[in-house]
Image (cartoon, rainbow, N blue to C red):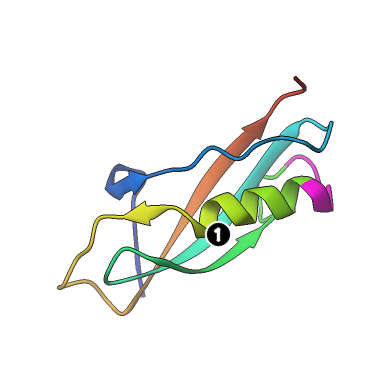
Amino acid sequence: SSDVCSSDLTSRPTPQNNCNEAGTIVVRVTVDRNGNVISALPGVKGSTNSSSCLKNIAKDAAMRTKWEPKASASAEQIGSIVYNFKLN
């Protein structure tokens, strides 16, 4: 597998923080050749909060991101997305 870089992001939905918690959640994503996220694992290294609420909304947003399609890419590429949640 190869890595995708954030410059290849074409659509990045903003998660709605309804958790009443703050912190950083890093989500490791696996992206297919078509630019679709096929799996997302929230709470990996770099995350500052282990809140299941924040992790769930970060994962939901990550699953809805779109990346630049690359026909020449490996079938699965790995990347990460950092979400910084602030208290409203």
Q: Identify the residue shown where x is 79% and y is 42%.
A: 49
Q: Which of 2/14 is in front?
A: 14
Residue designated by label 1 = 28
Q: Residue 80 at what x, y percent from top left?
A: 49, 53
Q: Residue 33 at what x, y percent from top left?
A: 27, 72
Q: Which of 48/17 is in front?
A: 17
- Relative to residue 30, is residue 46 drawn left or right? right
Q: Is residue 29 above or below residue 57?
A: below
Q: Identify the residue shown where x is 55% and y is 59%.
A: 28
* Chain part drawn in magenta: 48-53
- Relative to residue 75, is residue 60 drawn left or right? right
Q: Say which amino acid is labelled 1.
A: Arg
Q: Residue 13 at what x, y percent from top left?
A: 48, 42
Q: Main secondary structure of the magenta part?
A: loop
Q: Is residue 68 above or below residue 76?
A: above
Q: Is residue 22 above or below residue 10?
A: above
Quadrant that contains the N terminus? bottom left
